[in-house]
Amino acid sequence: MARSGRVTLKMIAQATGYTINTVSHALNGKGDISPATALYIRQKAREMGYINDMAASSLRSGYTRTVALIFPNVANPFWALFLKCIDRELHRYHYVSLMMDTDEDSHLEYQAVQAAISHKVDGIILCPNQRNLEAVQLIEKNNVPYVLLGRRFPGRPMNYVVWDEESGGYQAASYLLGLGKRRILFVNGPRHISSSVERYSGYRRALEEHGIPLDPQLVVETDLSAAGDNQELKRVFQHPASFDAILAFSDFIAWEIMVLLKDRRDPRLGSLPIVGFDDIQSNLRIPVSFATVGMDKQACAQRAVEILISLIGKHPPQQPIQEILPTHLALHGMPPGSELGNLLEL
């Protein structure tokens, strides 16, 4: 065995009786080796536990076949589901993924980008926390192909795949207004995030169309990463303004709201309709269903990977690729207003 303990091309050559060059060509799919010889060498390499040295391969080809996925909070099932979709798409192109979690923290995001670049990834798919541009600028300075997913910096020449957040906020608010609700509490994300701004715009448009003036007391912002100990949410519901429906920035936030309301044991809360965002329920079975705004996660993942692969290629697009994919309202068969009532009975 080699000093490192790894199986080497030389060891496979000795075991098969072929030259190191022949073994290398067989394992790398070169067409100058007969199919029978290539199959024999690959089988022997597999038996011996051979693993391709990506570092050496990257020195020869200039590519590592690795893509970094840098997301804000993989404890949120929404991002976990997206990671699975993207990883599946990358496998179709014979790429592997390197996943990193920034927890909506700018410093961690910058460190994640540094680590990705130091590992010589071929590309990066990033959902930025958007507190600043430092991480994205670091990617650009190192000429690493990248695609933003889920969030964007409007007016900047960056590649991104996002969904129609304004339409989603409009659809959610319009649904609640259609139920006869007039005081909709909107628990939004931080205003530095593009999706928060755009969903709020949709919420306002729906109110305006129904002739309902905006009440600033019914729009609150909450931290997106403080799962289980969200002090901002606790303050909101400790002395809440009068409201008859709730629109949550995400399904994750909607769940937190439900738990807080359940802990209050207030019977008036049982008839409050709530709408989330992300449609996790289409992918995971959960005890309590509720209305939510969704998007085709597989289509988003597929498009993000397609764009990144085109950027990694020898002839990348000359202009930024910026795509906005549609959203839809998903009701999941839940009678309006029964969401919290069912939870209070659990």
Image: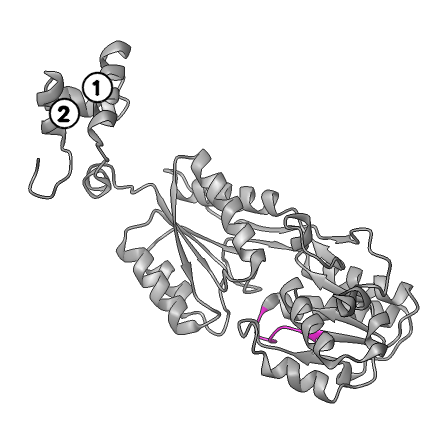
Amino acid under disc 1: Ile
User: Quadrant location of the C terminus?
Assistant: bottom right
For the point 43% across and 66% down, which residue is it? 102
Q: How is the image coloured?
A: one colour
Quarter of the image for residue 196 reads bottom right
Residue 342 is left or right of residue 112, and the answer is right
- In the orientation shown, which residue stands out farthest toward the front? 346
Q: Position of residue 113 (x, y in %)?
A: 36, 61
- Magenta stretch? 187-193
Amino acid under disc 2: Ile
In the image, residue 119 sits, relative to residue 52, either above or below, namely: below
**Which element type, helix, strand or loop, lies under badge 2?**
helix
Neighbour tally class for label 2: few under 14, some 14-19, many 20 plus, Cα within 10 Å? many
**Main SS category, magenta section:** loop
- Would residue 137 be visible to someone looking at this image? yes
For the point 21% across and 19% down, which residue is it? 41
Q: Position of residue 201 (x, y in %)?
A: 73, 69
Residue beneath disc 2: 12
Residue 279 is left or right of residue 342, and the answer is left
Residue beneath disc 1: 41
Neighbour tally class for label 1: few under 14, some 14-19, many 20 plus, Cα within 10 Å? many
Residue 46 is left or right of residue 313, and the answer is left
In the image, residue 322 sits, relative to residue 211, either above or below, namely: above
For the point 51% across and 70% down, which residue is it? 130
In the image, residue 324 sits, relative to residue 222, either above or below, namely: above
**Which element type, helix, strand or loop, lies under badge 1?**
helix
Given residues 160 and 335, the one toward you in this image is 335
- Would residue 249 be visible to someone looking at this image? no
**Cβ atoms under marks 1 and 2 closer than 8 Å:** yes
Residue 210 magenta-highlighted: no
